[in-house]
Amino acid sequence: MFKLKEDFEQVLDRYEAWWDCEVLDRPLVSLIYPASDAPGDAVPQKSYSSLREAWMDTDYVVARTEAQMHARVYYGDALPVTFPNLGPEVFSAFYGCPLEFGETTSWSEPILDRMDATAVAQLQLDRDNVYFRKILELTDALIEVGRETFIVGYTDLHPGGDAIAAFRDPQALCLDMIEHRNAVKALCDRITDDFLTLYDLYHQKLQAAGMPSTTWLNATCRGRFHVPSNDFSCMISNRMFEDVFLPGIMRECRHMDRSIYHLDGPQALRFLDTLLDVPEIHAIQWVPGAGQEHWAQWINVYQRIQAAGKAFCLYPPVEDLDQVFEVLRPEGAWLVLGGVPDHETAEAVVQKVTRWRR
């Protein structure tokens, strides 16, 4: 189906089993390593007067992406995925937030100076917005070069609390949660409507091009796939999260066939049990944060996820696999392994994972 992933249908079967915390022939394991036949100068180089200009150059982004995709081997259950990317706050930029570009990411500037009815009513999704049009342009261009070769996903979308924090500024939104909670709830409900409409726009475009559903987190499924999140939640209480933002997250997930929640940072762990109780959340991506990345610090977290009957992804070093096998079960585990140098190492890892039993 895809030249860079000729066994895609078999891999898709494994993902479907993973979502259900089942194992077919083996647990999910993803490894990416450099292609031995990739030329050293495959990625094109170009000079720009600004970082913004580089991010917005569709022809260059597509040429660079195509070269990068062919420079790697996607082994095991790793998927050759790219997506149109203007940074993690592009959803808020669709409403008018200016974007500032760095070397590897971008960030938005707030535009909502007060949480009152007049100001909030002026905040509207703009389909003529330069970033909205650029994402569609990038999507179409990536589809054109990737068709039958690699997978194109939808852009990184963050509605809900993270979008409102970008509109308003996180500190100001913390005060709004006390002083204008109903207004925040109403805005969250409205932008969730926008998100679902926008998601379907991307999904239909990609499905028509023969692409499975995926995005920045390279899982997939038969149907609609989504990565809900709310990094802003680390700044509020459990009761506020459940009252204001959880209903929108549940609406997002009910619109999808499969959802993996992006749980980011130790301060977010207090929401884990609440999220595990949501039937439409099928998996958890736990991201501990800088300086706390080693998976073994969080064995109890992965065990709680497994005890709740949910799937998860795990990022251990290859040399820790025996310890992983001792403390976790293979059902619902997706191992994402970096630092694999070549085919021989990758094949040895896959064979080892194949032998993992309860």
Image: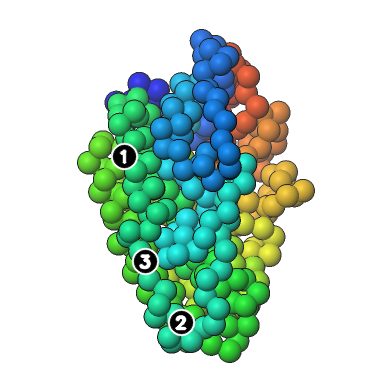
The quadrant of the picture occupied by the N terminus is top left
The percent coordinates of residue 275 (x first, y second) are 52, 65
Residue reaching furthest right?
Answer: 291
Q: Disc 1 marks which residue?
A: 140
Q: Classify 10 Å Cα crowding around label 1: few (below 14), some (14-19), many (20 and above).
A: some
Q: Is residue 124 left or right of residue 286?
A: left
Q: Classify 10 Å Cα crowding around label 2: few (below 14), some (14-19), many (20 and above).
A: few
Tell me the CA gap for discs 2 and 3.
14 Å
Q: Classify 10 Å Cα crowding around label 3: few (below 14), some (14-19), many (20 and above).
A: some
Q: Looking at the image, is mark 1 or mark 2 nearer the viewer?
A: 2
Can residue 271 be seen at all in this image of the molecule? no
Q: Disc 2 marks which residue?
A: 119
Which residue is pictured at 37% across the width and 74% down the height?
190
Residue type highlighted by circle 2 = Ala
State the SS at label 3.
Answer: loop
Which residue is pictured at 56% across the width and 68% down the height?
110
The percent coordinates of residue 60 (x first, y second) are 46, 31
Residue type highlighted by circle 1 = Asp
